[in-house]
Amino acid sequence: MKITFDDGYLTTYEKAYPYMKKKGLKGICFVVVDWIGKRDRMTLKQLLKLQDEDWEIGSHTITHPNLTKIDIKIAKTEIVLSKILLESKGLKIKSFAYPFGEYNEEIIEIVKKEYEWARACYRSSGSKWTKPSYNLVNKLEGIGYPMVHSIDQPQYRSNITMERFKKLCQTLV
């Protein structure tokens, strides 16, 4: 089992990666194309390093829109072009994470044509995870791949502490 990381936060590289490497753990990092190298986000060089260390890098769209609330043609561009752009940078992309965990049947059909698997996330007791699928869901704790955004960055609502992150890793060792 691997921990998934959304949005490409720099703390994934600076905090999670070194700790997980010591524990022999690998992760999956879902990145937003337009956020690569921006404030608090990983650079392309860091993403390539993770990939070289057998981490999976996946797409999380170009701009991180709620795909169910935009025109389907724009949603398709976000899904398809994000993979093309990431691969043009040397990343091997086989997975996709739905921004905000939101998807519908139209979105799933587009994703199915481009990716080997995809996942969404929410914190509900009804979440399930079955691979391979194009509408995977998971929780921070429980069934499926655990999901993390940022570590020790309280300015983000989806932040967790390094202490909690270490406890999460202990469940995987």
Image: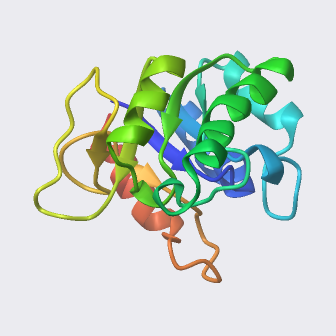
Query: In what quadrant of the picture does the N terminus appear?
Result: top left
Rendered view: 97 above or below 168: above
Rendered view: 118 above or below 169: above
Residue at position x 53%, y 47% in the image: 5
Pick whichever, 127 or 62, lies toward us.
62
**Quadrant in the picture for residue 145:** top left
Residue 134: x %, y % from top left:
34, 30
Rendered view: 152 above or below 1: below
Residue 127: x %, y % from top left:
17, 52
Residue 18, visible in the rendered structure: no
Residue at position x 63%, y 53% in the image: 7
Rendered view: 95 above or below 52: below
Q: Which residue is situated farthest in the left direction here? A: 126
Residue 170: x %, y % from top left:
33, 45
Query: In what quadrant of the picture does the C terminus appear?
Result: top left
Residue at position x 47%, y 42% in the image: 4
Pick whichever, 76 or 24, lies toward us.
76
Residue at position x 32%, y 40% in the image: 105
Residue 16 left/right relative to 122: right
Pick whichever, 14 or 92, lies toward us.
92
Residue 43 left/right relative to 23: right
Count of marks overlaid on the render: 0
Q: Which residue is situated farthest in the bottom direction here? A: 155
Pick whichever, 28 or 163, lies toward us.
28
**Quadrant in the picture for residue 83:** top right
Q: Which colour scheme is used?
A: rainbow
Residue 81, visible in the rendered structure: yes
Residue 146: x %, y % from top left:
35, 47
Residue 147 left/right relative to 71: left
